Image (spheres, helix red, strand yellow):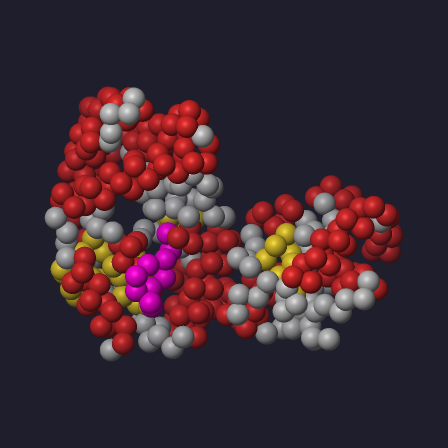
Amino acid sequence: MREDTNNYRKLFLNDTPMVDLRAPVEFSQGAFPTAISLPLMSDDERAQVGTCYKQHGQEAAIKLGHQLVSGQIKEQRMERWLAFCRNNPEGYIYCFRGGLRSRTTQQWLKDAGVDYPLVLGGYKALRNALLTVLSEVSESLPFHIVGGKTGSAKTLMVNTLANAIDLEGAAHHRGSSFGSFVNPQSTQINFENITAIQMLKKQHAGFQQLVFEDEGRHIGSVDLPAPLYQKMLAAPVAVIEDPFDIRLQRLLKEYVIDMVADYTRVHGEEQGHLLCEEYLLSGLDKIRRRLGNERWQILRETMEKAIKLHQAGAGYDAHLNWLTPLLQWYYDPMYEYQLSLKADRIVYRGNWQECHDYLKEKSVG
């Protein structure tokens, strides 16, 4: 039998499959990329046991737990755990602290003829290990930042550099008012976990520095962890300087063409078009105050016309009529101001390929 483990970093480095035995509500708040939710108790069962514990103590709570998870309910859950064990012989199970829930499940599996290890300390220990990684790697490795105006393909840059960390991918958000995707954004905990695992893997691979996209304190609804953000604020910046027309075409594809395709793929043609329209209009509405009412009104009317045209099958070019002034009036001036605050940290300027080559050379330098 493989032994229970407290080698938390190895679990993440190896992308080890894990069963999360916590209740669904706990899992939804935050988990790990290779974990699957196969709870010992449902949310309601967990709540009942918790109430019993407070009123009557641990022994009564354990007894109630065994009553609630028995018979057919227990059999169904056992089937799912046993299937996971068969399909993932290298995996582990965990609960919140590596206590009663995982020990009980481990014993039930053993009674069924399967010796399967658990994670000592459970979710809490795994989570703390990743928070430690965030702090340690932020402190120990130098950073470089990829800057550039909206549409400069900064995210593409970090996804093509071996030593780069994709913060927006971890957040599942592009960091702008039009930054959301069809599926919901990561929770704060999941964002931190995914980012920490990326950083751990880069450190383990032996990279001497890390590259990040230039980000504010927030990416959509998530916040950058303090140690990471503080390090980014002092890091040298390489600025992509691509032509306006190239950036404009990238935005058309990213904000409109790709999003229409994603919404219609997930929700069907009719509903997808309606939801994509809502996404575009709400994205513009989020920056109404900063645009000013007059400019916001102009852009909104232009956007509504463009949406009607593409919904009628007339293509997407009309969207350039609002994307162009959006860059000129809002995104470009805003980024120029933000970049002026970083002037003393700018170490390189060039087009996309030149910045890519510069940062790639730095990664092995």
Report the span colored magenta: 159-168
Most common secondary structure along the magenta stretch: loop
Per the image, is 162 magenta? yes
Q: Quadrant of residue 51?
A: top right
Residue at 27% over, 58% down: 157
Above or below — where is 264 with respect to 77?
above
Give the left or right position of residue 77, taking residue 174 as reference: right
Tell me residue 112's x, y (percent): 82, 62
Residue at 29% over, 31% down: 284
Above or below — where is 277 with respect to 350?
above
Tell me residue 60's x, y (percent): 87, 52
- Say if residue 351 shows up in the picture: yes
Q: Quadrant of residue 99?
A: bottom right
Tell me residue 271's x, y (percent): 44, 26
- Say if residue 234 shows up in the picture: no
Residue at 61% over, 54% down: 36
